[in-house]
Image: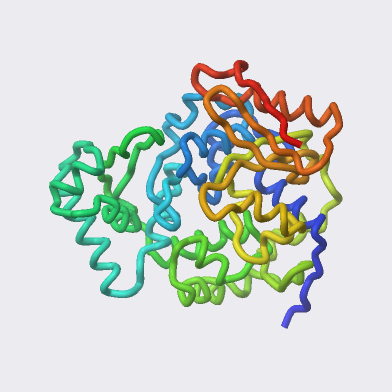
Amino acid sequence: MTARLDLTRAQILAFRRHVGALDQRLPRGSRSLRRAAWAGLQDSMPRAALLSIHARVAGTESSTLADSSLVQLWGPRHHAYVIAARDRAVFTLGRLPDEAGPRKIAEDLAARLHALLGGATMKYGEAGRTLGEHNANRLRYAAPTGTVLIQWDGARQPTVWTVPRPEVDPRDARLELARRYLHIFGPTTAEAFAQWAGISPPRGVAAFDALRRWLTPVRTPVADGWILTSDEPTFRAAPRAAASARLLPSGDAYFLLQGRDREVLVPDASRRRVLWTPRVWPGAVLVAGEIVGTWRRGLGTVTIQAWRRLTRAARDAVEAEVASLPLPDLRGQLVVRWED
């Protein structure tokens, strides 16, 4: 048995910022968009995926989500996600149920939807009604077949259409999904992976067991876990300079955490309750590598609740991020309201 590697909080945060491209923005282009979406970009809040890209890729514009290298689908836990088009199998077949009953439901829904649309697009509410589904949300269960794509801007119902099923073994897709999770969220556990992916705990454990020879056991300040062995040198690397400020939207991968994993990111329990609320999460304000508050946008105003007094330079950096948000018709016109 390999000895456990002890990792400090500083090492874990530095690693996650680095692999998440949050210390220095990537150059614009499809390769950078794929890296930004390596574990998918949750898009359940309007334009959340766009703002996650903006935090990681230079030159992000309000039209970036229309880039041909990206697609939108119902991903982990049936949330709306933006992913690289070439990674469709990972985020769909990687979650396809093994159990005969749930898999049959997914495949039957997908087949019926494909027969209905015949290459056309349709609002998912209309598609659900036409198929006789009382609750159109049930169409989301077809997504793990890899044949359903959506387009949703947060204001209207998603548009759905079907595409050919990826020619990838679901087991291979699941292992790649687990590797993606380990790389972006590590150190982590099989149980945390299963919860994030929306699969059964035994399937999460089976995926980690299949990857075991490529994993290294670690001890963190809050629990034991696993990392990809190939990531160990990055964890051990000298600290990198953190970005002066980033605004992370609700559901951003950097804080899309559950359970004790949240304690590493935000040690103060009272602040964790403010960031991870029972309902819609606010965004997170990242300053010099630490989450220092939350933010919300209402019309043309961005309200920032700082957890501690920030320097003038830090406030200027945050306000510069607000001014650069790639929101249609609002760029450079947003008003910042501070709540200390």
What quarter of the picture does the C terminus occupy? top right
Q: Vertically, is 297 above or below 281?
A: above
Q: Vertically, is 181 above or below 311?
A: below
Indicate the quadrant where residue 182 lies.
bottom right
Q: Is residue 192 left or right of residue 88?
A: right
Q: Nearer the viewer, residue 111 or 136?
A: 136
Residue at 57% over, 27% down? 60
Residue at 74% over, 34% down? 245
In x, y percent, where is residue 265?
72, 55
Residue at 72% over, 40% down? 286
In x, y percent, where is residue 178?
53, 63
What quarter of the picture does the N terminus occupy? bottom right
Residue at 52% over, 25% down? 299
Indicate the quadrant where residue 223 lies.
bottom right
Q: Vertically, is 35 above or below 63?
A: below
Q: Nearer the viewer, residue 242 or 38?
A: 242
In x, y percent, where is residue 321?
68, 27
